[in-house]
Amino acid sequence: MPVAAGRLRSAARTQPTSGPATRGGPAKGPVSQRLVRAVATLAVAAVVVILVLYPLGRLAVVVGTDTSGQLFGGAPVAEVLRTTVALALAVTAAAVPLGTLAALGLARSDVPGRRVLRVAIVLPLLVPGFVLGYSWTQAYGRGGFTDFLFGLPWRSVQGPAGVWAALVVSTVPVVYLLVAVGLAARAEPELARAARSSGAGPLAVLVHITLPLLRPSIAAAAVLSVVSTLDSFAIPQAMGGSGDFTTVTMAIYRRLSLGSDPAAFVQALALALLLVAVTLVVVVPADLWLGPRLRATRGAGPSGPVAVPGASRPHARSTGTGMHARSTRTAMSRWISAGLSLYLVLALALPMVALLAAALTPAVGVPPTPAHWTLDNFRSVLNARSLAAFGRSAGLALLAAGLLTVLGAAVAVLERRRIGRALAGLVTVALVVPGSTVAVALLISYGRWLGGTLLLILLAYLAKLWALAHRPISGALDRFPPGELQAARASGAGLAVAVRTVAARPLAPALLGAFCICGVTALHEVTMSVLLYGPGTETLAVIVLNSAEIGQIGPTAALSLLLTGAVLLPVLALWPAIRRLRTR
Amino acid sequence: MTSTSSSHSEAAPLSGGSAAPPDLLQVRNLTVRFGSVSAVDDVSLRVQRGEVLALLGPSGSGKSTLLGAVAGFWPPEAGEVLLHEVVVAGAGWGLPPERRDVAVVFQNYALWPHLTALDTVAYPIRRTGRRRLAARTEAASILELLRIAHLADRRPAEMSGGEQQRVGLARALARRASLYLFDEPTAHLDAHVRGLFLAELVARRQATGAAAVYTTHDAEEALGLADRVALLDNGRLVQCGTPEQVYSEPVHAWAAHITGAASIIQPAGLLPPSHPPVSGLGGTDLSGPVLVRPGWARFGGTLPGRIRGVRFRGPDSDFLVETPAGEVLIREPGPPTRPVGAAVEWTLTRAWPLPLTQR
């Protein structure tokens, strides 16, 4: 199995300019070091088997040996599959151009409000998918914000079109980040300047130089977009759950909800395996094509600001390479700023305001004017059950983030050797396996003993998110110059002291980043939690989902805001620390 | 071809007379700022057709920034850039690079990683509207001219630094510009490849008759290659003149050191009446410091000294001689013939008085 998503995700990191920290070192160290390494390798391998290999293998065996003849019985599998694939392609077709344009536009240094826009464009990543979807229904649906203000309801917001739009909004930040990093890593400013001084205009530079250089990053973003849409559950469930619209993940959820029907359970297993097959159909060829290109040698030269027609040196007060009369460049930048601002208002700000309005409004049909504002919805949801669920969510997220940072670092260190690389590959596979499949696989493997417990949910988080912790740490290790550690050793420091005094600081942002990304993802994870929870083990995200399913609009909106706050606040609190570490 | 004047502010004489050839490039009072930093500060320069001007200065002196402003990569904060006597950049604005009659060779080659050498060289030709086949044919002939036709199908990752720089030069030549800008093109090349590249550059210049501005921090390279040399320090023009002028008549100690090995001594009371006349010091008040280049003093004579250090340089040897006026570097052909600590006598043949207010 190729290390599919690992290579895809590697688009997001700079190609190393030197070998990894320990690569190229002596083949064998002292006996004690070799022993420690062997024990660590065995321990990590055991965890990989428990979390990834055994559950997925068991799923394949159970489905493969089913004799009930009801694997796909009674289910319009072909239609569900067609819907899911069509949705993934449609989302990708819109999100990739939008995210790419945003990255190219925000690479220009003279875009008004650039710093704010660069943060705002990735904010949807911090808004739980379910909350984003639900906020769109409150903003644009019947009785929603636009209906109240302008009498313009978007009737199909709770259907395929709405699901598509919200998934596009949630996918654009991923594309933006991959392309922006690709710009920083691959498209050096001198390459654009060389083209301009060779006679190329801004458009020619974009078409002939910038976009070809970004092709691997854009392709990786497209593949990730397809994979994440195939895997998506929260947004389709929030916006399409009440209609005929069904994706594979929704179908799995519905069949597992029919807990007493053995046939439905088997069908859920079959669908879970089918989803893996569809995902691999996309990922494997993409990996074979992308892998070598993402590792392609960069052009010589120092890294610097991005090579976008119109981009300039960091502190220059003009568009640099794309010099024109001042009025022209300002107009273009203003258009970019205005376009992105409008997009963010429609995609995120208005829906969140609508959500707030719904939370402050006492009942459906009551105008969301200040005269009617009340905190009753917040009071009603701040009960013992939701507070306990919040405690469970926070505890699970913190525990998962801590364990994942350790596991991610372990694999990142071990992957400097062949056996470690195989483990890293397996860890990455779990990331591209849909969450529904991971949950189902764990359920049939350990459900007998751990069904309905928080431990099973924790195992699911660890399996699914391991690669999220591994990739940033591995990237940081790749970028860490081996000479620094060798210089410390040559200056008299032992290995432990050298790591603590020289390596710890440069690696700290990656470790903290891995902790944050895992914590945030775990905090608003719902795809797996909703399949694995039991009485008394609901997470906050599950409570929100259940609240929506019984039609409590005001309380759902209040809970959604609380969940979003629970995600946003820790990130905002930790963000300055990460920035400070990165700039030191 | 070039002016013989040495000036703090202008690189060529003002074209006041009708006989003066038109300037290809004029830089007038140019200032470029990045944030609060003045990378180029009130610099004026002129380059005539067929002339090679070297910008010599240490890292961070503003050479590359000045070159970028001429190329059109960033606009001036103040001042003007004129090409063919037409203003192409003024305060806060500028024609984009593709509309200027210039070609650039970059320090870091700046080859596009996704294009082969042939397509890279064909790129500027294509931008003139030529068809793909015609552009590639012409590009192939340029590669042939530079004796790198065998690289045609290679991408940058498959080439050495020297090969990449030749392809970069070929790309610039394909632009067929009147002015070539070289941004430290040999900075990353080893001595052998650097020699080949510079020889190639001289040959191309003679063939095309185009003008060039060449940035370097290597004095030997600048003096050997350029018709005139402009010294830059902290974004300001320090001196501009022929290589011989900037080497022999530096405006102050910093300019003396940046242009080559320099001994600065205080000759007051050093020279006895019997000492032969010293070229460059006729009628000069000897109370201040003077510059002595390695070739301007020789062993033998009446001045006392003691050897403090010896350095073998291959074709010649340098002797650091401690004298009552300060330390003097004396260069002799061949391997070292005098040991460290030996008492010697020496003669000063030439010197250049420096201003008292040294940098």
Image (spheres, coloured by chain):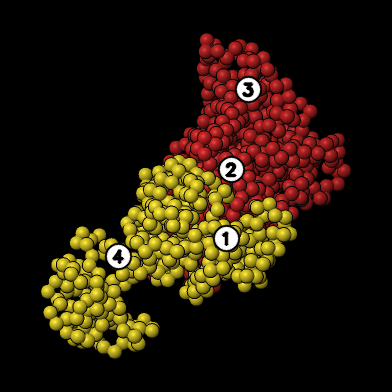
Query: Split into 4 quadrants, where in the image is the N terminus of chain A?
Result: bottom right
Cα separation between marks 1 and 2: 27 Å
Q: Nearer the viewer, residue A12 or A53?
A: A12
**Image side of residue B82 versus residue A536, left or right:** left
**Label 4 secondary element:** loop
Looking at this view, name the residue that lies furthest to the front.
Answer: B18
| Residue at the disc numbered 4 | B250
Q: Which mark is on residue A139?
A: 3
Q: Disc 3 vs disc 4: which is toward the camera?
A: 4
**Image side of residue A432 versus residue B296, left or right:** right
Under mark 3, the amino acid is Ala
Instruction: Residue A472 in the image: state x and y as whole percent.
Output: 54, 51
**Image side of residue A35 versus residue B269, left or right:** right
- Residue A141 lies in what quarter of the image? top right
Under mark 4, the amino acid is Pro
Q: Does label 1 lie on the same chain as label 3?
A: no
Cα separation between marks 4 and 2: 48 Å
Residue drawn at x 51%, y 70% as measured from the top left: B202
Under mark 2, the amino acid is Leu
Residue drawn at x 28%, y 62% as measured from the top left: B251
Q: Is residue A380 above or below residue A564?
A: above
Q: Does label 2 lie on the same chain as label 3?
A: yes
